[in-house]
Amino acid sequence: MRLVATGVTYTYPRGDHQVLAGVDFDIPPGTSAAIIGPSGSGKTTLLSLMGHLLPMQAGSIHALDDSGNELRLRDTASWVLQTVSLLPDRTALDNVMVGAYSAGASRPDAVARSREALASVGLAGRDDEPARILSGGEAQRVAIARALASQRPIILADEPTGQLDAKTSATVLEAMIGAHGERTVVVVTHDPEVAERCDVVLELRDGVIHERARA
Ligand SMILES: Nc1ncnc2c1ncn2[C@@H]1O[C@H](COP(=O)(O)OP(=O)(O)OP(=O)(O)O)[C@@H](O)[C@H]1O
Ligand SMILES: [Mg+2]
């Protein structure tokens, strides 16, 4: 799925400045893109617009399938938010199954897919633990597994590796990209190693995107 943004601007209703001042990008299908930029530069705002959590003020963001049909991100993407939200009294597996069920999986399918997703983020064998006893980084990985279990062609993730060590970050990023690299992945990150592993790096600065050539 290709991901295209054109002329996206955003000013918070009570904000004193325009956070996004004309964001453009064109991310080819099956590409992993890192969005980097200083704290407060508008990365979460951009992801929130992509997730329909904020209303668009100007410009557009949409997905395009192989035939060039425009699709809403709401129907094609899954999200990993900066603040992790899990059902605390349910198990890790139950939490991930929410993702599989949202995609219409049957129970046996949902269980199989969810176990696989948990294993892919390094949490094999932790299926039956209640979410409330997990560490911050483990909870974050359950949220990522939940997004993976929905098997949508696009993943949008806000600092998904913020609480992870370098080795676990690499595992998680590989899991998001997928074995065949078929998924389009957008990762907001402050971690240069994560950015380095992505196909493209988009830097958000002064409200616009500067595409960075990688070394
Ligand atoms: N609800 C809000 N009302 C007014 N201003 C806001 C609101 N939410 C965010 N902002 C402002 O918008 C700007 C961009 O915030 P945003 O959360 O998108 O930054 P960010 O790049 O994700 O930062 P970080 O790396 O710290 O997560 C900041 O100046 C912030 O203060
Ligand atoms: Mg943010």
Image: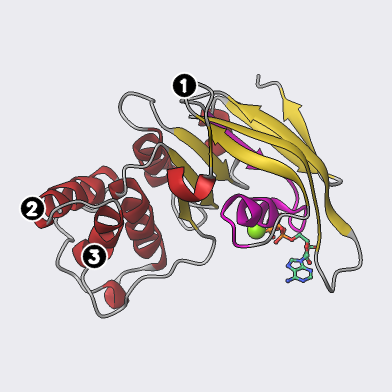
**Which region shows up in magenta?**
32-53
Q: Amino acid at mark 1?
A: Asp
Q: Which residue is depicted at the point 80% across and 66% down? A: 12
**Left or right: where 190 falls relative to 133:** right
- What percent of the width, then of the height, locates residue 187? 55, 43
Circle 3 packing at 10 Å, graded few (<14), some (14-19), many (20+), is: many
- What percent of the width, then of the height, locates residue 47? 62, 51
Do the numbered discs 1 and 3 sit on residues whose CB atoms are within 8 Å? no
Q: Nearer the viewer, mark 1 or mark 3?
A: 1
Q: Is residue 76 above or below residue 30?
A: below
Q: Is residue 107 visible?
A: yes
Q: Which residue is mark 2?
A: 108
Circle 1 packing at 10 Å, graded few (<14), some (14-19), many (20+), is: few
Secondary structure found at label 3: helix
Q: Which numbered disc flags the more N-terminal residue, 1 or 2? A: 1
Give me the C-alpha separation between circle 1 and circle 2: 31 Å
Q: Which residue is mark 1?
A: 66
Q: Which mark is residue 92?
A: 3
**Left or right: where 23 falls relative to 185:** right
- What percent of the width, then of the height, locates residue 140? 40, 60
Q: Quadrant of ligand 1?
A: bottom right
Q: Is residue 107 above or below residue 119?
A: below
Q: Nearer the viewer, mark 2 or mark 3?
A: 2
Do the numbered discs 1 and 2 sit on residues whose CB atoms are within 8 Å? no
Q: Amino acid at mark 3?
A: Ala
